[in-house]
Image: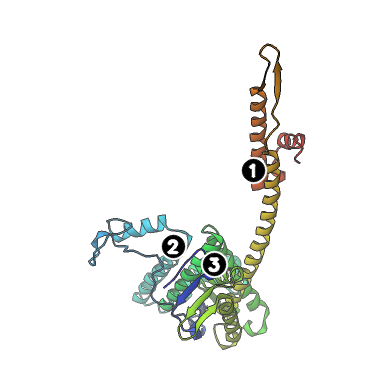
């Protein structure tokens, strides 16, 4: 069961897992009619649903209880779940949808006697090629490959890993950033795969017919971004006990490195590419966060100085012999204060260069540039 808390240092995640089969496989195909050999990685994370808790089938649940989606058929429920779901839910849905389409096509090819239809046609158009000349013909495969799976175990273990570590990533970085690291991490994995197959002698004989599919590169980016950012996270692994997330990540890298020569070399190389991007993402995010916090602190001090109690202006009236505050001066100061606050907010969001000449002049005159 996945346990979540906002206290990052004390989080423990219980995962029933066999560490020997730790990761989601990525497959490399030979489109000349047969599949290249590949390792069968995998994980035993249990049977948790990647779509959260609750019954997705409306009020027809024979075990009682209601549904967070209300009544209606399964198609309506899925549409509503996709529309209202977070980035993690949407990514998992897209992967499953593509998988189902591939399986339907595979069945149709089988029925019409096309034994290698999936390898020669579907994978050819969805899998990313190792050869750069083919990549120029099929450039969209840099994106489609990371949503494409063929085997049931392939997509099952990939989506379970994505579900577990995607939730951790969202807790750390936020929901909106999951899409970015998933896409760019997948591209990073594909780029390293292409570079390796284009330059290393071991792959020269097979690079022209090789394709890679699977979300593993993207998932490794998510995993390592979370591990580097929160190395003290702990997970409980069956028969092993509590393990720090960073230690698990290092084990994954070692297994990938040692598995390159044993089969599915393209998949393992793509894993390493995704992992490398995840590390870079975490380190640069921490650096940008520090810079942002420093800049925000400076702006906060500037605003604090500006918002300090303003001088009270008095005017002496000879007729009443009473001192009183000038309302016109107060209104003027309030307007200037609001104007400066708007300018400071704009600097905080978009930088100093985003200011217009008039705004820079106002800021300069106020003595705050």
In whole angstroms, how far apart are the C-alphas of marks 1 and 2? 33 Å
In whole angstroms, how far apart are the C-alphas of marks 1 and 3? 30 Å
Q: Nearer the viewer, residue 147 or 121?
A: 147
**Residue 315, image x and y in percent?**
70, 20
Residue under numbered circle 3: 8
Q: Residue 157 sits in which quadrant? A: bottom left
Q: Residue 344 sits in which quadrant? A: top right
Reply above or below: 45 against 53. Answer: below
Going 65% across and 58% down the picture, which residue do you hit? 289
* Disc sitting over residue 345 in the figure: 1
> Which mark is first along the chain, 2 or 1?
2
Going 46% across and 84% down the picture, which residue do you hit? 18
In which quadrant is the C terminus drawn? top right
Residue most toward the front? Answer: 321
**Residue 41, image x and y in percent?**
49, 82
* Disc sitting over residue 213 in the figure: none
The color scheme shown is rainbow
Q: Nearer the viewer, mark 1 or mark 3?
A: 3
Q: Secondary structure beneath disc 1?
A: helix
Going 63% across and 35% down the picture, which residue do you hit? 338
**Residue 39, image x and y in percent?**
51, 84
**From the viewer's perspective, is 139 left or right of 336?**
left
10 Å crowding of disc 1: few (<14), some (14-19), many (20+): some
Q: Nearer the viewer, residue 335 or 206?
A: 335
Residue under numbered circle 2: 89
Q: Nearer the viewer, mark 3 or mark 2?
A: 3
Residue 155 visible somewhere in the drawing: yes
> Which mark is first along the chain, 3 or 1?
3
In whole angstroms, how far apart are the C-alphas of marks 3 and 2? 22 Å
In which quadrant is the N terminus drawn? bottom left
Going 64% across and 27% down the picture, which residue do you hit? 331
């Amino acid at each position: 069961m996945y346990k979540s808390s906002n206290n990052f240092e004390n989080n423990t995640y219980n995962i029933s897992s066999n560490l020997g089969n730790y990761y989601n496989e990525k497959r490399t195909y030979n489109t000349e009619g047969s599949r290249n050999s590949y390792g069968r990685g995998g994980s035993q994370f249990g049977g948790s649903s990647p779509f959260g808790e609750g019954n997705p089938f409306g009020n027809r649940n024979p075990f009682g209880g209601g549904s967070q989606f209300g009544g209606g058929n399964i198609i309506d429920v899925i549409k509503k779940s996709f529309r209202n779901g977070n980035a993690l839910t949407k990514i998992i849905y897209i992967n499953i949808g593509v998988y189902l389409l591939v399986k339907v096509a595979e069945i149709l090819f089988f029925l019409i006697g096309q034994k290698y239809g999936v390898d020669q046609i579907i994978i050819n158009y969805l899998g990313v090629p190792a050869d750069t000349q083919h990549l120029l013909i099929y450039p969209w495969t840099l994106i489609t490959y990371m949503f494409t799976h063929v085997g049931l175990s392939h997509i099952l273990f990939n989506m379970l890993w994505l579900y577990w570590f995607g939730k951790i990533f969202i807790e750390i970085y936020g929901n909106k950033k999951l899409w970015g690291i998933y896409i760019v991490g997948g591209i990073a994995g594909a780029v390293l795969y292409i570079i390796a197959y284009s330059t290393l002698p071991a792959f020269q004989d097979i690079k022209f017919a090789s394709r890679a599919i699977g979300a593993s590169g993207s998932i490794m980016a998510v995993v390592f971004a979370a591990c580097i950012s929160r190395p003290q996270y702990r997970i409980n692994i069956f028969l092993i006990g509590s393990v720090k997330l960073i230690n698990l990540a290092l084990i994954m890298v070692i297994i990938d490195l040692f598995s390159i020569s044993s089969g599915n070399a393209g998949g393992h190389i793509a894993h390493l590419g995704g992992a490398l991007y995840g590390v870079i993402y975490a380190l640069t995010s921490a650096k940008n966060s520090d810079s942002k916090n420093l800049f925000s602190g400076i702006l906060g001090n500037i605003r604090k100085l500006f918002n300090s109690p303003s001088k009270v202006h008095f005017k002496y009236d000879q007729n009443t012999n009473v001192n009183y505050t000038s309302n016109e001066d107060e209104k003027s100061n309030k307007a200037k204060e609001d104007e400066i606050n708007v300018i400071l907010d704009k600097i905080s969001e978009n930088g100093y260069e985003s200011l217009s000449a008039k705004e820079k002049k106002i800021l300069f005159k106020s003595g705050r540039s």
